[in-house]
Amino acid sequence: MTAIPPALVDALRAAREVTVLTGSGISAESGIPTFRDAQTGIWAEYRPEDLATPEAFAVNPRRVWEWYAWRRQMVSDAEPNAGHYALARLASLVPRLNLITQNVDGLHQRAGSENVIEYHGNILRNVCSIEGIVVDEQPVGDELPPACPACGGPLRPGVVWFGEAIPPAAMEAARRAAEACDLFLSVGTSSLVYPAAGLMEVALRNAARLIEVNPNPTPVTGLADFPLTGAAGDVLPRLVDALCERGE
Ligand code: BV8
Protein backbone atom coordinates (compact mmCIF):
# COMPACT_ATOMS: atom_id res chain seq x y z
CA MET A 1 0.00 0.00 0.00
CA THR A 2 1.64 3.23 -1.11
CA ALA A 3 2.37 5.68 1.72
CA ILE A 4 1.32 9.35 1.50
CA PRO A 5 4.62 11.31 1.57
CA PRO A 6 4.63 14.12 4.20
CA ALA A 7 6.12 16.40 1.52
CA LEU A 8 2.98 15.84 -0.56
CA VAL A 9 0.75 16.80 2.35
CA ASP A 10 2.87 19.94 2.82
CA ALA A 11 2.49 20.73 -0.89
CA LEU A 12 -1.29 20.30 -0.67
CA ARG A 13 -1.44 22.54 2.42
CA ALA A 14 0.58 25.24 0.66
CA ALA A 15 -1.31 24.99 -2.66
CA ARG A 16 -3.21 28.02 -3.92
CA GLU A 17 -5.01 26.13 -6.69
CA VAL A 18 -5.28 22.39 -7.32
CA THR A 19 -6.41 21.00 -10.67
CA VAL A 20 -7.55 17.40 -10.91
CA LEU A 21 -7.86 15.36 -14.13
CA THR A 22 -9.66 12.04 -13.84
CA GLY A 23 -9.99 9.17 -16.30
CA SER A 24 -11.99 5.98 -16.39
CA GLY A 25 -9.77 4.42 -13.71
CA ILE A 26 -11.53 6.39 -10.96
CA SER A 27 -14.84 4.76 -11.92
CA ALA A 28 -13.35 1.24 -12.12
CA GLU A 29 -14.14 0.63 -8.42
CA SER A 30 -17.73 1.63 -9.16
CA GLY A 31 -17.91 -1.31 -11.52
CA ILE A 32 -17.60 0.65 -14.77
CA PRO A 33 -14.96 -0.95 -17.02
CA THR A 34 -12.16 1.30 -18.25
CA PHE A 35 -11.46 1.74 -21.94
CA ARG A 36 -8.41 -0.54 -21.53
CA ASP A 37 -10.59 -3.28 -20.05
CA ALA A 38 -11.87 -5.82 -22.51
CA GLN A 39 -15.54 -5.41 -23.35
CA THR A 40 -17.92 -8.20 -22.36
CA GLY A 41 -20.91 -10.05 -23.77
CA ILE A 42 -22.12 -9.09 -27.25
CA TRP A 43 -19.72 -6.12 -27.19
CA ALA A 44 -16.66 -8.31 -26.60
CA GLU A 45 -15.82 -8.32 -30.32
CA TYR A 46 -15.72 -4.50 -30.53
CA ARG A 47 -13.07 -2.02 -29.37
CA PRO A 48 -14.52 1.13 -27.75
CA GLU A 49 -12.44 3.34 -30.00
CA ASP A 50 -14.14 1.68 -33.01
CA LEU A 51 -17.64 2.42 -31.70
CA ALA A 52 -17.08 5.90 -30.19
CA THR A 53 -16.72 7.60 -33.61
CA PRO A 54 -18.95 9.59 -35.99
CA GLU A 55 -18.07 7.07 -38.71
CA ALA A 56 -19.37 4.13 -36.66
CA PHE A 57 -22.59 6.07 -35.99
CA ALA A 58 -22.99 6.93 -39.68
CA VAL A 59 -22.46 3.31 -40.76
CA ASN A 60 -24.61 1.69 -38.07
CA PRO A 61 -26.43 4.21 -35.85
CA ARG A 62 -28.53 1.47 -34.19
CA ARG A 63 -25.46 -0.54 -33.09
CA VAL A 64 -23.75 2.57 -31.65
CA TRP A 65 -26.97 3.65 -29.92
CA GLU A 66 -27.40 0.18 -28.37
CA TRP A 67 -23.77 0.18 -27.16
CA TYR A 68 -24.42 3.46 -25.40
CA ALA A 69 -27.72 2.14 -24.00
CA TRP A 70 -25.74 -0.79 -22.51
CA ARG A 71 -23.20 1.61 -20.99
CA ARG A 72 -25.92 3.99 -19.77
CA GLN A 73 -27.52 1.12 -17.86
CA MET A 74 -24.14 0.33 -16.24
CA VAL A 75 -23.69 3.99 -15.32
CA SER A 76 -27.21 4.27 -13.91
CA ASP A 77 -26.65 1.11 -11.81
CA ALA A 78 -23.26 2.38 -10.55
CA GLU A 79 -22.59 4.39 -7.41
CA PRO A 80 -19.76 6.84 -6.76
CA ASN A 81 -16.89 5.21 -4.86
CA ALA A 82 -14.54 6.42 -2.10
CA GLY A 83 -12.30 8.03 -4.71
CA HIS A 84 -15.10 10.24 -6.03
CA TYR A 85 -16.14 11.21 -2.49
CA ALA A 86 -12.54 11.99 -1.49
CA LEU A 87 -12.21 14.47 -4.38
CA ALA A 88 -15.53 16.09 -3.40
CA ARG A 89 -14.13 16.46 0.17
CA LEU A 90 -10.76 17.76 -1.06
CA ALA A 91 -12.53 20.75 -2.66
CA SER A 92 -13.38 22.05 0.83
CA LEU A 93 -9.80 21.64 2.08
CA VAL A 94 -7.89 23.70 -0.50
CA PRO A 95 -8.43 27.35 -1.52
CA ARG A 96 -9.50 26.45 -5.07
CA LEU A 97 -10.01 23.07 -6.77
CA ASN A 98 -10.75 22.56 -10.48
CA LEU A 99 -12.06 19.11 -11.46
CA ILE A 100 -11.69 18.06 -15.11
CA THR A 101 -12.99 14.62 -16.01
CA GLN A 102 -12.59 12.59 -19.18
CA ASN A 103 -15.37 10.36 -17.89
CA VAL A 104 -18.91 10.64 -19.16
CA ASP A 105 -20.62 8.85 -16.24
CA GLY A 106 -21.56 11.83 -14.05
CA LEU A 107 -20.31 10.06 -10.89
CA HIS A 108 -18.29 13.07 -9.68
CA GLN A 109 -21.46 15.17 -9.58
CA ARG A 110 -23.34 12.38 -7.78
CA ALA A 111 -20.53 12.33 -5.18
CA GLY A 112 -21.04 16.06 -4.57
CA SER A 113 -18.35 17.65 -6.74
CA GLU A 114 -19.43 20.97 -8.25
CA ASN A 115 -18.48 22.80 -11.46
CA VAL A 116 -17.16 19.59 -12.97
CA ILE A 117 -15.54 20.19 -16.38
CA GLU A 118 -16.93 17.33 -18.51
CA TYR A 119 -14.16 17.32 -21.11
CA HIS A 120 -15.74 14.48 -23.11
CA GLY A 121 -19.40 15.22 -22.40
CA ASN A 122 -21.97 13.16 -20.54
CA ILE A 123 -23.39 9.79 -21.61
CA LEU A 124 -26.77 10.49 -20.00
CA ARG A 125 -27.43 13.49 -22.27
CA ASN A 126 -29.08 13.12 -25.69
CA VAL A 127 -28.16 15.44 -28.57
CA CYS A 128 -29.79 15.82 -31.98
CA SER A 129 -27.18 14.59 -34.47
CA ILE A 130 -28.48 17.07 -37.06
CA GLU A 131 -29.00 20.24 -35.00
CA GLY A 132 -26.30 19.53 -32.41
CA ILE A 133 -28.54 20.67 -29.56
CA VAL A 134 -29.29 18.88 -26.29
CA VAL A 135 -32.69 17.16 -26.35
CA ASP A 136 -34.15 16.81 -22.86
CA GLU A 137 -37.49 15.28 -23.81
CA GLN A 138 -37.72 11.55 -23.27
CA PRO A 139 -37.63 9.91 -26.72
CA VAL A 140 -40.91 8.29 -27.82
CA GLY A 141 -41.48 5.34 -30.11
CA ASP A 142 -39.31 2.27 -30.43
CA GLU A 143 -37.09 3.19 -33.38
CA LEU A 144 -33.36 3.16 -32.52
CA PRO A 145 -31.77 5.66 -32.44
CA PRO A 146 -34.86 7.65 -31.40
CA ALA A 147 -35.84 10.58 -33.61
CA CYS A 148 -35.33 14.19 -32.55
CA PRO A 149 -38.83 15.53 -31.67
CA ALA A 150 -38.03 18.80 -33.48
CA CYS A 151 -36.43 17.73 -36.75
CA GLY A 152 -36.79 13.94 -36.85
CA GLY A 153 -33.02 13.40 -37.15
CA PRO A 154 -31.41 10.57 -35.14
CA LEU A 155 -30.50 11.34 -31.53
CA ARG A 156 -26.97 10.54 -30.31
CA PRO A 157 -25.34 10.52 -26.88
CA GLY A 158 -23.96 13.88 -25.71
CA VAL A 159 -20.35 12.69 -25.69
CA VAL A 160 -17.23 13.68 -27.67
CA TRP A 161 -16.33 10.94 -30.13
CA PHE A 162 -12.83 10.23 -31.44
CA GLY A 163 -12.16 12.70 -34.24
CA GLU A 164 -14.54 15.28 -32.72
CA ALA A 165 -13.49 18.55 -31.14
CA ILE A 166 -13.72 19.12 -27.38
CA PRO A 167 -16.60 21.54 -26.60
CA PRO A 168 -15.02 25.04 -26.63
CA ALA A 169 -16.22 26.00 -23.14
CA ALA A 170 -14.77 22.83 -21.60
CA MET A 171 -11.57 23.21 -23.61
CA GLU A 172 -11.07 26.80 -22.40
CA ALA A 173 -11.96 26.08 -18.76
CA ALA A 174 -9.63 23.09 -18.66
CA ARG A 175 -6.75 25.00 -20.27
CA ARG A 176 -7.12 27.83 -17.74
CA ALA A 177 -7.27 25.33 -14.87
CA ALA A 178 -4.10 23.59 -16.08
CA GLU A 179 -2.25 26.91 -16.55
CA ALA A 180 -3.27 28.42 -13.21
CA CYS A 181 -2.73 25.54 -10.82
CA ASP A 182 0.32 24.95 -8.64
CA LEU A 183 -0.58 21.29 -8.12
CA PHE A 184 -1.93 18.98 -10.86
CA LEU A 185 -3.46 15.69 -9.70
CA SER A 186 -3.89 13.02 -12.41
CA VAL A 187 -6.12 10.13 -11.32
CA GLY A 188 -7.00 6.93 -13.18
CA THR A 189 -5.98 7.88 -16.68
CA SER A 190 -3.63 6.15 -19.09
CA SER A 191 -2.68 9.63 -20.39
CA LEU A 192 -2.98 8.36 -23.97
CA VAL A 193 -5.98 10.31 -25.24
CA TYR A 194 -5.42 13.86 -26.50
CA PRO A 195 -5.98 16.72 -26.09
CA ALA A 196 -6.85 15.71 -22.45
CA ALA A 197 -3.43 14.16 -21.90
CA GLY A 198 -1.84 17.44 -23.00
CA LEU A 199 -3.28 19.23 -19.95
CA MET A 200 -0.58 17.73 -17.77
CA GLU A 201 2.07 19.19 -20.06
CA VAL A 202 0.40 22.61 -19.80
CA ALA A 203 0.48 22.40 -15.99
CA LEU A 204 4.12 21.28 -15.93
CA ARG A 205 5.06 24.11 -18.31
CA ASN A 206 3.51 26.50 -15.77
CA ALA A 207 5.66 25.13 -12.95
CA ALA A 208 2.95 23.06 -11.35
CA ARG A 209 3.95 19.95 -9.48
CA LEU A 210 2.39 16.68 -10.63
CA ILE A 211 0.75 13.98 -8.51
CA GLU A 212 -0.34 10.79 -10.25
CA VAL A 213 -2.63 8.12 -8.76
CA ASN A 214 -2.68 4.94 -10.82
CA PRO A 215 -2.00 1.24 -10.06
CA ASN A 216 -0.01 1.05 -13.31
CA PRO A 217 2.73 3.16 -14.90
CA THR A 218 1.72 5.63 -17.62
CA PRO A 219 3.67 7.94 -19.99
CA VAL A 220 3.61 10.68 -17.32
CA THR A 221 4.64 8.60 -14.30
CA GLY A 222 8.28 9.53 -14.86
CA LEU A 223 7.36 13.23 -14.80
CA ALA A 224 5.38 13.05 -11.55
CA ASP A 225 6.78 14.72 -8.43
CA PHE A 226 4.57 12.38 -6.42
CA PRO A 227 3.76 9.12 -8.27
CA LEU A 228 1.34 7.21 -6.03
CA THR A 229 0.93 3.59 -7.12
CA GLY A 230 -2.49 2.34 -6.16
CA ALA A 231 -6.23 2.45 -6.67
CA ALA A 232 -8.04 5.76 -6.48
CA GLY A 233 -10.56 4.38 -3.97
CA ASP A 234 -7.68 3.52 -1.62
CA VAL A 235 -5.16 6.31 -2.16
CA LEU A 236 -7.41 9.39 -2.40
CA PRO A 237 -9.24 8.93 0.94
CA ARG A 238 -5.85 8.41 2.67
CA LEU A 239 -4.50 11.54 0.98
CA VAL A 240 -7.44 13.60 2.22
CA ASP A 241 -7.21 12.06 5.73
CA ALA A 242 -3.49 12.93 5.89
CA LEU A 243 -4.31 16.51 4.87
CA CYS A 244 -6.97 16.75 7.61
CA GLU A 245 -4.69 15.24 10.24
CA ARG A 246 -1.91 17.73 9.44
CA GLY A 247 -4.48 20.49 9.64
CA GLU A 248 -5.33 19.80 13.30
C1 BV8 B 1 -9.62 15.33 -31.35
C2 BV8 B 1 -16.13 9.91 -24.79
C3 BV8 B 1 -9.43 16.78 -33.22
C4 BV8 B 1 -16.80 8.87 -25.64
C5 BV8 B 1 -13.75 9.69 -25.26
C6 BV8 B 1 -2.17 11.70 -31.77
C7 BV8 B 1 -1.99 12.90 -31.08
C8 BV8 B 1 -3.06 13.70 -30.70
C9 BV8 B 1 -4.36 13.29 -30.96
C10 BV8 B 1 -4.52 12.09 -31.61
C11 BV8 B 1 -3.45 11.31 -32.03
N1 BV8 B 1 -3.96 10.22 -32.68
C12 BV8 B 1 -5.30 10.28 -32.67
C13 BV8 B 1 -5.64 11.41 -32.03
C14 BV8 B 1 -6.94 11.88 -31.77
C15 BV8 B 1 -7.63 11.17 -30.61
C16 BV8 B 1 -6.75 10.43 -29.66
O1 BV8 B 1 -6.20 11.00 -28.73
N2 BV8 B 1 -6.63 9.11 -29.89
C17 BV8 B 1 -5.84 8.28 -29.01
C18 BV8 B 1 -6.44 6.88 -28.97
C19 BV8 B 1 -4.41 8.27 -29.51
N3 BV8 B 1 -8.30 12.21 -29.89
C20 BV8 B 1 -9.48 12.64 -30.34
O2 BV8 B 1 -10.03 12.17 -31.31
C21 BV8 B 1 -10.09 13.80 -29.59
N4 BV8 B 1 -10.50 14.78 -30.54
O3 BV8 B 1 -8.42 15.13 -31.33
O4 BV8 B 1 -10.24 16.13 -32.27
C22 BV8 B 1 -10.27 17.85 -33.78
C23 BV8 B 1 -9.93 19.18 -33.52
C24 BV8 B 1 -10.71 20.17 -34.07
C25 BV8 B 1 -11.82 19.83 -34.87
C26 BV8 B 1 -12.16 18.50 -35.10
C27 BV8 B 1 -11.38 17.50 -34.56
C28 BV8 B 1 -11.33 13.36 -28.85
C29 BV8 B 1 -10.99 12.32 -27.83
C30 BV8 B 1 -12.24 12.03 -26.98
C31 BV8 B 1 -12.78 10.65 -27.30
N5 BV8 B 1 -13.88 10.33 -26.39
N6 BV8 B 1 -14.78 9.48 -24.42
C32 BV8 B 1 -17.21 7.67 -24.84
O5 BV8 B 1 -16.91 7.57 -23.63
O6 BV8 B 1 -17.86 6.80 -25.45
S1 BV8 B 1 -12.22 9.16 -24.82
C33 BV8 B 1 -12.40 7.83 -23.79
O7 BV8 B 1 -11.21 7.12 -23.86
C34 BV8 B 1 -12.53 8.20 -22.35
O8 BV8 B 1 -13.34 9.31 -22.15
C35 BV8 B 1 -11.13 8.43 -21.93
O9 BV8 B 1 -10.77 9.76 -22.11
C36 BV8 B 1 -10.36 7.61 -22.91
C37 BV8 B 1 -9.75 6.44 -22.20
O10 BV8 B 1 -8.75 6.99 -21.46
P1 BV8 B 1 -8.67 6.78 -19.88
O11 BV8 B 1 -9.75 7.51 -19.22
O12 BV8 B 1 -7.30 7.10 -19.50
O13 BV8 B 1 -8.98 5.28 -19.67
P2 BV8 B 1 -8.05 4.10 -20.00
O14 BV8 B 1 -8.89 2.92 -20.04
O15 BV8 B 1 -7.19 4.45 -21.18
O16 BV8 B 1 -7.05 4.00 -18.75
C38 BV8 B 1 -7.59 3.74 -17.49
C39 BV8 B 1 -6.47 4.00 -16.51
O17 BV8 B 1 -6.98 3.79 -15.19
C40 BV8 B 1 -5.30 3.04 -16.67
O18 BV8 B 1 -4.10 3.77 -16.64
C41 BV8 B 1 -5.40 2.13 -15.45
O19 BV8 B 1 -4.13 1.73 -14.98
C42 BV8 B 1 -6.06 3.05 -14.45
N7 BV8 B 1 -6.84 2.38 -13.41
C43 BV8 B 1 -7.47 1.20 -13.46
N8 BV8 B 1 -8.09 0.96 -12.27
C44 BV8 B 1 -7.84 2.04 -11.47
C45 BV8 B 1 -7.04 2.94 -12.20
N9 BV8 B 1 -6.62 4.10 -11.68
C46 BV8 B 1 -6.97 4.39 -10.41
N10 BV8 B 1 -7.74 3.58 -9.65
C47 BV8 B 1 -8.18 2.40 -10.15
N11 BV8 B 1 -8.94 1.59 -9.38
Image: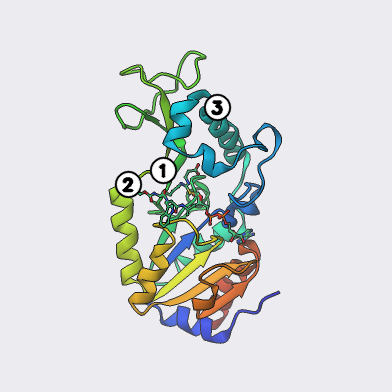
- Please rate how many residues cluster around mark 3, counting C-alpha atoms within 10 Å: few if below 14, some from 14 to 19, many from 20: some
Amino acid type at circle 2 is Pro
- The quadrant the N terminus occupies is bottom right
Numbered disc 3: secondary structure: helix
Numbered disc 1: secondary structure: loop
Q: Is residue 208 above or below residue 57?
A: below
Residue drawn where x is 48% and y is 45% of the image:
104
Residue 40: horizontal and vertical position, in percent? Answer: 69, 39
Q: Check disc 1 and report the residue beneath it.
A: 160
Amino acid type at circle 1 is Val
Q: Nearer the viewer, residue 43 or 116?
A: 43
Q: Check disc 3 and report the residue beneath it.
A: 63
Residue drawn where x is 40% and y is 51% of the image:
119
Q: Check disc 2 and report the residue beneath it.
A: 167
Closer to the N terminus: mark 2 or mark 1? 1
Amino acid type at circle 3 is Arg
Is ligand 1 closer than 8 angstroms to the Cβ of mark 1?
A: yes
Let me know if residue 82 appears in the view. Answer: yes
Residue 4: horizontal and vertical position, in percent? Answer: 61, 79
Whether label 2 touches label 3, CB < 8 Å? no
Whether label 2 touches label 1, CB < 8 Å? yes
Which is in the foreground here, disc 2 or disc 3?
3
